[in-house]
Image: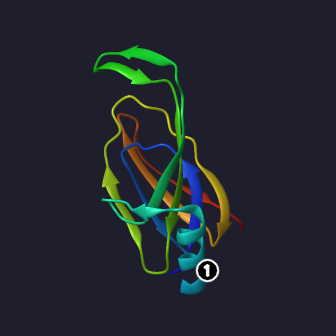
Amino acid sequence: MPTSIGVGRAGRTLGHAVGESTTDDQASRLIEQLGLIAHPEGGHYREFFRSTVAVSTPRGARCASTAIWFLLGAGEFSAFHQVLGDDEVWHHCGGDPLRLHSLDERGARTVRLGPI
């Protein structure tokens, strides 16, 4: 399985890499260069932006926006996790394509991110 790196926000999502493999050396270099740490649900990440603006939500005040680098190395996957009321934006920045699976009140969807 390949390395994929993206910028995103969390939701009830599962991501896994598809296609040809990117070398583990590339993933290791990116993890070091970007200062990524292991994510509890799989992969590696680092938050690089947090808005100073707060918004009111049913769960209390929340940051208006955050952004993370997220990397899945060869053989890694991101476990399903829940995002309560947050929007997600994903940008595929390199590596092999990624399948992003989402579940919500409208049902299940799969989106392929990255080159075809």
Residue displayed at 49% across by 54% down: 46
Is residue 106 shown left or right of residue 41?
Answer: right
Element type at mark 1: helix
Is residue 26 visible in this depiction of the protein?
yes
Q: Position of residue 17 (x, y in %)?
A: 51, 71
Q: Nearer the viewer, residue 97 or 44?
A: 44
Q: Position of residue 98 (x, y in %)?
A: 56, 65
- To which residue does mark 1 refer? 26
**Measured along the vertical axis of the image, is residue 8 above or below residue 45?**
above
Is residue 21 visible in this depiction of the protein?
no
Q: Nearer the viewer, residue 1 or 70?
A: 70
Q: Residue 44 appears in which quarter of the rendering?
A: bottom left
**Measured along the vertical axis of the image, is residue 14 above or below residue 84?**
below
- Looking at the image, how many numbered discs can be counted on the residues? 1
Q: Residues within 10 Å of mark 1 (few under 14, many from 20)?
A: few
Q: Residue 104 appears in which quarter of the rendering?
A: top left
Residue displayed at 41% across by 74% down: 76
Name the residue type under label 1.
Gln
Instruction: Identify the colour scheme used.
Output: rainbow
Is residue 40 shown left or right of residue 99?
Answer: left
Work out which quarter of the rendered image holds the C terminus and state it. bottom right
Q: Position of residue 50 (x, y in %)?
A: 52, 34
Residue displayed at 40% across by 36% down: 106
Residue furthest to the right = 115
**Measured along the vertical axis of the image, is residue 105 above or below residue 71?**
above
Q: Nearer the viewer, residue 19 or 63?
A: 63
Residue displayed at 58% across by 51% down: 7
Q: Nearer the viewer, residue 10 or 51?
A: 51
